[in-house]
Amino acid sequence: MITLQVDLGKRSYPIYIGQDLLGKPDWVLPHIKAKQVLIVTNETVAPLYLEQTLTAFHNFQTMTVILPDGEVYKNLTVLNQIFDTLLTQHFDRHTTLVALGGGVIGDMTGFAAACYQRGVPFIQIPTTLLAQVDSSVGGKTGVNHALGKNMIGAFHQPQCVIIDTNTLKTLENRQLSAGLAEVIKYGLINDAEFFVWLEQHAEALLARDSAALSFAIERSCRDKAAIVAQDEKEISGTRALLNLGHTFGHAIETGFGYGHYLHGEAVGVGMCLAAQLSAKMDWLQPIDLTRILQLTAKMLLPTCVPNQVSAEQLLELMKVDKKVHSGKLNLVLLQGIGKAVLTSDYQPDLLQQTMFEGIVTS
């Protein structure tokens, strides 16, 4: 079992990574200060892991909320199911919420914890690769709006993150690849050595080799924790680098309708578009662009999108982004593998050209 630390002063917390962590009280007891616990999960994860997880909370007054599964349900209407339970069952301000599931459950549970009685503690127990390497760490919580993804939310750090790698055994292949998109992201933004390792171990990761997956999860969490410790609330711009591919990806998710593309699939396309724009600006060498496109495809991720939406639609949706400042869209682009920058210094015509080339006839 590996323990990492997200160093945020009084808001610091551990990340536990290992096998057979579900259902073990040792990992949750130090992080719960009162008796009331509400576990939030979904219809897919509950039959697999809820009963096992509940054994860790047998000394608490525990209830559960089971939400529908999918990005399409990550909205204020479904979020109210959590608040309805908290209020009707008289949960107080010392309640601990527990997110058992993927990124949607983690984001929604964290947002509910940030809002309920102006903030209660919560614990992340991510069960998908994407949630384990990305969304469960760093305290970004929220829900989607029809006009933009994750535009309603709050920063609210968990008490701890418990990553049981055994949960990846039941993960669908498509979900595994979606998580690998976020893993590739860390190699691209500031860890070129990790990118090389991913090129060498792509087959092992897709085959669910336990040692390879454990290493990739630990390295990804370590990279993200270091960035979050520098810029918790995305003030200096350092943390914004974690959004490589996300401005493009969020537009794709919104444009096609939430759930059509998995988040990681859209980010995979987005990273390829960011790399292509970077190459057009002569920031990225052609050989490195080829490596990025090849690794993304090798991880069974899309590198472009069909023409069910237009480039103009996607460009318009990109304007509804948290990185828009004074009417100017900032993008995370690449000056090399392992060297990402946040910039508004790009030519709009090159961005438009990149978007048109990223849409293919289906």
Image (tube, helix red, strand yellow):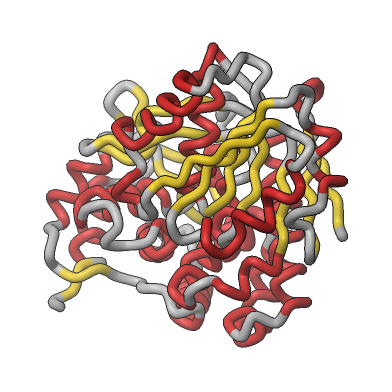
**Residue at x 82% of width, y 46% of height:** 25
Residue 26 x %, y %: 87, 46
Q: Residue at x 41, y 49 (%)?
A: 246
Q: Is residue 85 left or right of residue 229?
A: left
- Relative to 158, does residue 89 appear above or below in the rendering? above
Question: Is 101 on the left-hand or right-hand side of 145?
Answer: right
- For this rendering, which residue is in front, 24 or 227? 24
Residue displayed at 76% across by 68% down: 215
Please state, as top left, top right, bottom left or bottom right, where the N terminus lies in the image. Answer: bottom right
- Which residue is pictured at 33% across the width and 48% down the height? 250
Q: How many marks?
A: 0
Which quadrant would residue 34 be assigned to in this image? top right
Q: Is residue 358 left or right of residue 231?
A: left
Percent x, y of residue 188: 58, 60
**Whole-percent x and y of residue 249?**
35, 54
Nearest to the observer: residue 267 or residue 108: 108
Near-viewer residue (133 or 326):
133
Q: Is residue 336 visible?
A: no
Q: As drawn, is 70 to the left or to the right of 7?
A: left
Q: For the C terminus, which image quadrant?
A: bottom left
Q: On the image, which quarter does residue 306 sit in?
A: bottom left
Q: Look at the image and tell me whether residue 301 can be seen.
A: yes
Image position, residue 254 (x, y; %):
25, 48
